[in-house]
Image: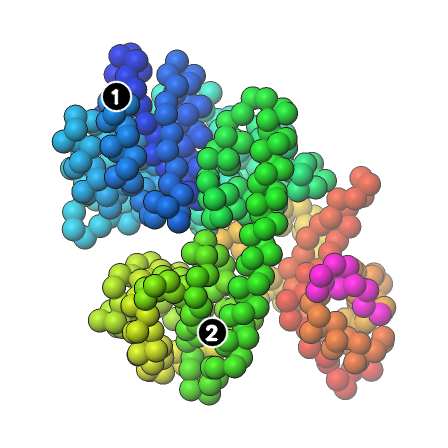
């Protein structure tokens, strides 16, 4: 950190040309935004480069380095990428540029790039105790070193990156996100404020859900379908009118992405239903021609949700397939790919998510190979959905004090999930009412009090078949809804079972 800070201060003093090279997802974009804002406060306006997925692929771009040299850049700062970019960083150094790497990805086995200016807490000699910061979280640390407390106002961007990059909301991340959500709720950032407006977020208290499901996808949409620069510009703008028009563009791109994603998901689901032998295959491997690389990861997640088995979705183009996979608990996807490595051109990832490149002619052999690996490693019991219950309780125990204490554990998300409870003896008071999509609402009672509960279509059908007055056991999480100054309690049903034999 000391050396990185000193090098940046030297660049600022000497008014050197600086290029910020990010990545196309929310973490890369917010990390670059934090660095731009920091450098501007120090009196320097840096150039930025964010790769377009289809055009530039992953990681540091050689093209961007050549352009930087032509433009007289003296210092390149990579954010959310760079730790594996040995060749590209070598190239930059040969052309007389220094490179600062701000990256939180795993260190490559082949060795680090040739620069001593690396911010990555996973380095063996890094004394920083917390290892799970997002890349924008690291950029924030650097900003703090340069600006002091002034950097705290960038915490809204840190919260966005931490949630969208699925970093665990434990340790320092929880504090960063908690404070970041408060700043986000105050709508200090013009662009994010405009984005909340077009997305019709009405509440004045934004939570991890708003970021993960509403703001995040809109910021990501540009990077997936076209250029991530729109999202960066939105985070940086000081013009309300520009904020509004950029937010509209992102919202429209997100709608297009959603529709496209729906179409590809439908096609993939049909392929699975037509071609997969569920008794034999435990891992789903589906391929399709020309599916956009920006959505195959999401489609794989949808398949996992629907069929509850690991899924790999491959998009083929001129003989080459690019795939993205998502797993279920108990199946190490990266190890499974390693075991099939001879059939793959490239692969990477971790336990729950991975990516790969494969020759089209090898796809069916790969499907067989990964499934014979799964036949040994993935027990049939692991293919059953399983909700972990934190506590058995009676509904009347959900008192105001209890709920206040529950709120102290927020923000919930990856690594810090919302607590899950189980209660029995709940009587169905009402018919299910459709709220939106496949979400329904019912009223349950434990005798003295009524409770609103949200459930899915399958659970609604169970209630309809049982009829009013029947008794259920429910596994659920609780949420309080603020409405007109009143707070109401809501049960989010995860599992529902009829209890027969109870009068
Ligand atoms: Mn990242």
The correct choice, above or below, for 430 with respect to 171 in the image is: below
Do labels 1 and 2 touch, CB within 8 Å?
no
Residue 228 seen from this side: yes
Q: Nearer the viewer, residue 171 or 318?
A: 318
Residue 436 forms part of the magenta stretch = yes
Q: Give the foreground label among 1 and 2.
A: 1
Q: Residue at x 60, y 29 (%)?
A: 243
Secondary structure of the magenta portion, mostly?
strand
Task: Give the quarter of the image for residue 202.
Answer: top right
Quadrant, the C terminus: bottom right
Q: Which percent across, then down, holds residue 314?
A: 40, 66
Q: Which quadrant would the N terminus be assigned to in this image?
A: top left
Residue of label 1: 72
| Position of residue 468 in the picture relative to residue 352 (left or right) | right
Mark 1 or mark 2: name the one nearer the start of the chain: 1
Residue at x 77% of width, y 50% of height: 488
Indicate how the structure is coloured in the image.
rainbow
Q: Does residue 75 show up magenta in the picture?
A: no
Residue located beneath label 2 in the image: 309
Looking at the image, residue 291 lies above or below residue 21:
below
Residue that appears at 75% across and 44% down: 482
Task: Tell whether 493 sits left or right of 154.
Answer: right
Spot occupied by residue 77 in the image (x, y as percentages of width and height): 30, 31
Above or below residue 457? Residue 218 is above
Q: Which residues are drawn in magenta? A: 431-441
Residue 308 x %, y %: 51, 73
Give the image location of residue 407, x and y in percent. 62, 46
């Amino acid at each position: 950190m000391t050396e990185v800070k000193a090098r940046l201060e030297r660049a600022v003093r000497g008014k050197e040309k600086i290029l910020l090279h990010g990545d196309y997802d929310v973490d890369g974009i917010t990390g670059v935004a934090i660095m731009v804002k920091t450098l501007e406060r120090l009196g320097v306006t840096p150039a930025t480069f964010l790769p377009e997925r289809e055009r530039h692929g992953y990681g540091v771009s050689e093209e961007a380095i050549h352009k930087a040299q032509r433009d007289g850049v003296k210092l390149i700062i990579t954010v959310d990428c760079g730790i594996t970019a040995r060749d590209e960083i070598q190239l930059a150094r040969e052309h007389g540029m220094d490179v600062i790497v701000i990256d939180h990805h795993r260190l490559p086995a082949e060795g680090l790039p040739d620069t001593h200016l690396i911010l990555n807490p996973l380095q063996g000699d890094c004394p920083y105790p917390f290892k799970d910061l997002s890349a924008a979280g690291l950029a924030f640390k650097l900003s703090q070193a340069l600006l002091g407390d002034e950097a705290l106002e960038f915490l809204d961007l840190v919260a966005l990156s931490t949630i969208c990059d699925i970093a665990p909301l434990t340790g320092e991340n929880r504090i960063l996100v908690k404070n970041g959500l408060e700043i986000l709720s105050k709508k200090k950032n013009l662009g994010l404020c405009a984005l909340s407006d077009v997305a019709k977020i009405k509440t004045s208290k934004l939570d991890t859900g708003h970021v993960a499901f509403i703001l995040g996808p809109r910021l990501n949409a540009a990077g997936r379908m076209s250029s991530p620069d729109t999202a960066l510009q939105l985070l940086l703008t000081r013009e309300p009118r520009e904020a509004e028009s950029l937010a509209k563009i992102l919202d429209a791109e997100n709608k297009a992405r959603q529709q496209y994603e729906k179409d590809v998901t439908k096609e993939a689901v049909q392929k699975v239903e037509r071609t997969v032998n569920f008794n034999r295959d435990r891992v789903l491997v589906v391929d399709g021609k020309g599916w956009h690389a920006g959505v195959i990861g999401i489609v794989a997640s949808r398949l996992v949700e629907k069929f509850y088995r690991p899924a790999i979705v491959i998009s083929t183009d001129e003989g080459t397939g690019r795939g993205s996979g998502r797993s279920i608990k108990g199946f190490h996807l990266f190890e499974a790919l390693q075991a099939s490595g001879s059939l793959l051109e490239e692969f990477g990832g971790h336990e729950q998510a991975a990516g790969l490149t494969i020759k089209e002619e090898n796809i069916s052999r790969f499907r067989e190979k990964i499934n014979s690996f799964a036949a040994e490693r993935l027990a049939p019991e692991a293919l059953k959905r399983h909700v972990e219950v934190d506590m058995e309780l009676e509904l009347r125990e959900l008192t105001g004090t209890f709920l206040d204490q529950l709120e102290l554990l927020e923000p919930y998300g990856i690594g810090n999930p919302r607590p899950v409870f189980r209660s029995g003896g709940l009587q169905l008071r009402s018919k299910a009412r459709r709220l939106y999509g496949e979400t329904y609402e019912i009223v349950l009672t434990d005798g003295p009090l009524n409770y609103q509960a949200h459930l899915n279509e399958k659970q609604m059908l169970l209630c309809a078949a049982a009829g009013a007055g029947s008794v259920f056991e429910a596994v659920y999480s609780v949420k309080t809804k603020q409405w007109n100054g009143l707070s109401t309690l809501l049960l989010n049903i995860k599992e529902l079972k009829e209890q027969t034999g109870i009068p």
